[in-house]
Image (spheres, rainbow, N blue to C red):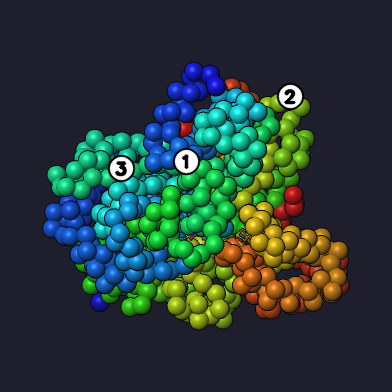
Amino acid sequence: MSPERRRKAEELAARYPRRQSALIPFLQYCQEQDGFVTRQAIRDGAEMCGLTEAEVESIASFYTLLFRQSVGKHLIQVCRTLSCMLRGAGELQEHIRRRLGVRNGETTPDGLFTYEEVECLAACDRAPCLQHNLMFHYNVTPDEFDRLLETWRASRPAVSLPAE
Amino acid sequence: MAPFEPVLTRGLGRLDLTDLSVYEAQGGFGALRKALRDMTPEAVVNEVSASNLRGRGGAGFPTGRKWSFLPNDGRPRYLVCNCDEAEPGTFKDHMLLEQTPFQIIEGLVISAYAIRAERAFMYIRGEFLEGYRIFRRALETARERGYVGPRIAGSDFSLDIVVHRGAGAYICGEETAMLESIEGKRGEPRLKPPFPANAGLYGMPTVVNNVETLCCVPHIVERGAQWFSSIGPPKCPGPKIISVSGHVRKPGNYEVPMGIPAGQLIEEYAGGLEPGRRLKAIQPGGGSSAAIFEEDLDTGLDFDSLAAKGTMLGSGGFVVMDDRTCLVRAALTLVRFFEHESCGQCTPCREGGQWVARMVGRLEAGEGSNADLAILRTLNRTLTGTNLCPLGDSIMPFLSSVLRRFPEEFETHVTQAGCPLAAEQAVAAGAGA
Ligand SMILES: Cc1cc2nc3c(=O)[nH]c(=O)nc-3n(C[C@H](O)[C@H](O)[C@H](O)COP(=O)(O)O)c2cc1C
Ligand code: SF4
Ligand code: FES
């Protein structure tokens, strides 16, 4: 583990009565730095908590916001559950898939955009909604999406999965 | 009777309640001072018991009773606030988190005092990054002002609140899965008993309460149990936030007296349906609840009245579907949700969820058969009551209820090899994954 990571691991562990409680926050921190949960992060997490790498793998794989493969600079997660479906999520999804030329779960070849269809984001009154690097956008029409896409293209977010 | 006055959402949209001085100017933290200065922990528990407050997270369990289960054996006790809100159609805790975080903090501190917890945990859904930031800032401010930390508001009571951000998993909203998740493990529900009251977080006595439940507590302390229990039905009283979405003109969160009739909520609060539309179905209590229909519009929205109708108030996620809605597609989005969110420990939930999602997927795509329908009609019995946690029991209720009420809509999907509403589907439709 790098000295910096070790410092972070200790800082997170100090928040909890037991060390392993800090494992997921630690992996979130590693993911923010590396873009996804790397093999090294799994090793560091195992060292931090006195677990095997297989145990940490198994824990990490449980959570949909811990990615084991690199994601694009822009992570676009569109809600596909009932209230959004009733208000046009299907059309929006079709539009995005066509615009980006990807299917659910894929990243554009230039590595910029990852597209995912996700479950209810607890914003059903402003449907359809999506998250871009975990920031909400509400009442997103296909036109509104195109406008957002331009602003995203023009920007260079430092991280697509912020930890804090 | 006095007219109903919203308290949980008072000032929202008008005042910036993320600013502590604004919250205080509205009387915020008055209840905390009162509880810590004038009341013993037992007195707070008694007040909450007398109010008949029932948990707003879904199960409607009496809060005071839950608090009184904790054994008196000297072990450390924990309080966990459940802000993992992910039940389809529910968005009230998300709003409370982002817009009135100090109310949550006040509820947490008073409740922790009542149960003598030495530490509290705030579990925030991973997707609520903005809410997490707002809450962390609010907590910092509350700490600086002495509302959290050592010797709160000059009393002998000290409390630390740990904010824990989730990492994506609906099942972590189930209380024992949440405890596993805070312990740094896979969020798999535990076998009960033992219940969290005896062996909860780190094996210690623990109470898990929903955000809205905790937000009720300061108001009960301030205004008294009598005030609370006089709102709505005596057995499940109080103000309740209902999240209304789908085909209404004004979707949103509405704080109403418990027991308000479904039709009144739609008409008087949510702006009614679009002109010329007719109601088809309502899912009254989140994705796990069975549907109600136009003949049920006078049903009161409370735990007992909806249970009597074979459904539930659940989390208060109220989704309205008008006559444009294809119920096969609506059911598909929900069974797919549960298929996706099953933690995989129990065979009926894991395998059954996949089977049902495939069958309804076939029907929706126009490739279903009458045999599929016959099987779907029997599955409610097979899949329900055979699982470790209520998620497995949530796969079938909506599907079964709409299949029973609109059998012809499902049958037509077989005979016409597709959706009969296709022409009108522009809004209700969407391509599957
Ligand atoms: C699959 C599943 C998901 C749940 N999700 C939530 C949730 O997101 N928020 C919540 O407060 N309760 C949720 N619950 C209910 C909790 O298990 C628990 O009953 C509740 O947090 C207790 O708080 P209360 O007594 O204040 O309602 C869920 C239950 C199940 C079975
Ligand atoms: S019912 Fe489903 S979600 Fe609940 S424990 Fe069993 S497999 Fe997991
Ligand atoms: S259904 Fe999309 S946010 Fe709830």
Q: Secondary structure at mark 2?
A: loop
Residue A92 in the figure: left or right of residue B92: right
Mark 1 or mark 2, which has the lower sequence index?
A: 1
Please give the name of the residue rendered at 27% of the width and 45% of the height, measured from the top-left corner.
B159
- Image mark 2: chain: A
- Whether B106 is drawn above or below A162: the answer is below
Cβ–Cβ under 8 Å for marks 3 and 1: no
Provide residue B47's location: percent of width, then percent of height.
Answer: 23, 67
Q: Quadrant of the N terminus of chain A?
A: top right
Q: CA distance from mark 3 to mark 1?
A: 16 Å
Residue type at the position of mark 2: Asp
Please give the name of the residue rendered at 61% of the width and 72% of the height, measured from the top-left corner.
B385
Residue A43 image label: none
Per the image, the residue denoted by label 3 is: B160
Q: CA distance from mark 1 to mark 2?
A: 37 Å
Residue A110 image label: 2
